[in-house]
Amino acid sequence: MTSETLHIIGGGLAGCEAAWQAAQRGVSVVIHEMKPLKFSDAHKNENLAELVCSNSLRSDDALHNAVGLLHQELRLANSLILSCADETKVPAGGALAVDRNAFAQLVTEKIKFHPLISVISEEITELPSADFGSVIIASGPLTSKPLAESILSHINNNALSFYDAIAPVVFKESINFDVAWFQSRYDKGDKFDYINCPLSKEQYYAFVDALLAAEKVDFHDWEKPNYFDGCLPIEVMAERGRDTLLYGPMKPVGLTNPHSTEKPFAVVQLRQDNKEDTLRNIVGFQTKLKHGEQKRIFQMIPGLENAEFARLGGIHKNTFINSPSLLDDHLRLKSQPNLRFAGQITGCEGYVESTAIGFLAGYFAATELKGLSPVLPPRTTAFGSMLAHLTETLPDDYQPMNINFGLFPAIEPVITPNGKLRHLKGADKKEALCQRALTDVSSWIKDISL
């Protein structure tokens, strides 16, 4: 090993993309991948870049969908993963679906035949030391136990999650403020810390009955967690008694509804989820309800009847670090800068998002190894918005998230012919965000081009 070699732990989509971007920039790369010597519980294929299902890459609409926009940004940036996906795609309407086996085989062939990339089949059980050289950890959400324990010891035992209990997140602008209001319990802290949605007695019990009757997603045998009381799914709390939620996340105490003289029987609170305050997290609503059921039932809550969801809830096995507290804006571990993290272990949710963060990690590392300064992607792009989620989110509220328009800086209102300001909404707003991103990402790509 020399200081000019980049080592990557993990051969998933993030690791392969990072390796490709670095090698294309003239840097020698070694990928350390534990398959086929050892498989995680979710993986069966011996190839690199294994997908769980054929439609894992999701929508390909680059003008109205955030993940479709990220597809296009990756294409423009000469992504290995997107080029292989396009070459192995299968019909799926507006989605980018692939033949999983053909996709993984093609990525593996391109990686193994690249003259600057070597693949070593071995399990890395400890993080390399500070004098080892440049390393990217892209070991994924099912990082092996020995490596996870080593990561934990490096980050002072306080910022590694083995299960993510995710509550739904809604777009703030979709909340009905004719019903909801801003207030913290007993007026503690800033009055804008929480948004409150009131329920009457009848509404509360109808909500609980719907929770109890709803369809749930089963755990895989390998991902069943031992619940602790601070992480119970909301439906499990409801199963303990129809009034349980009144003493938990839906307690009405310390709040006054300015829209009514009637005291609310129950209250649902939403907490700020990103720095721009475009997204709000439904407090205490982690859940294993099926996604369709979540939308239906959570829209029963007054004030959320028209809620648009940036993320739906879930609880599953997932190893991820608290990136905002641990990583700098070049994805380096602040306490040991020769180590970078990429992919789902950083808390980016989804294969496309992992690919994008792998791209950035590979580009950042290669540029530094060549003695140059990396150029950060514009904040207005999908690349930049995903990076900002990892490095700028409030650390106490950090959870994995897919790319969504709530992570992007707001679009300025347009001036109408009569001189008035018009705030873009719906499809117009999404298209404007995408057009801005594609313009800005094109300039960035010229700056970082080979």
Image (cartoon, rainbow, N blue to C red):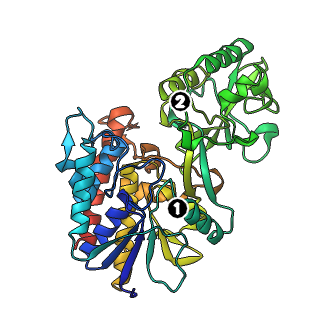
Quick one: label 2, few (<14), some, or many (20+) residues within 10 Å? few
Apparent side of residue 148 relative to residue 437 in the rendered image (left or right): right
Quick one: label 1, few (<14), some, or many (20+) residues within 10 Å? many
- Does the image show residue 414? yes
Q: If the image is split into quadrants, where does the C terminus sit?
A: bottom left
Establish if 165 lies above or below 425: below
- Residue drawn at point x = 19 percent, y = 47 percent: 88
Give the total number of marks visible in the rendering.
2
Q: Quadrant of residue 63?
A: top left
Mark number, residue 217: 2
Residue that mark 1 sits on: 391
Query: Type of residue at label 2?
Result: Val
- Residue drawn at point x = 37 percent, y = 62 percent: 11
Establish if 47 lies above or below 178: below
Dot 1 and dot 2 residues touching (CB under 8 Å) = no
Residue 58 at x, y = what percent?
A: 33, 40
Apparent side of residue 404 relative to residue 70 in the rendered image (left or right): right
Name the residue nearer the viewer: 235 or 263: 235
Residue 165 at x, y = what percent?
A: 61, 43
Name the residue nearer the viewer: 41 or 358: 41
Residue 225 at x, y = what percent?
A: 64, 42
Residue 313 at x, y = what percent?
A: 55, 36
Apparent side of residue 400 relative to residue 212 in the rendered image (left or right): left
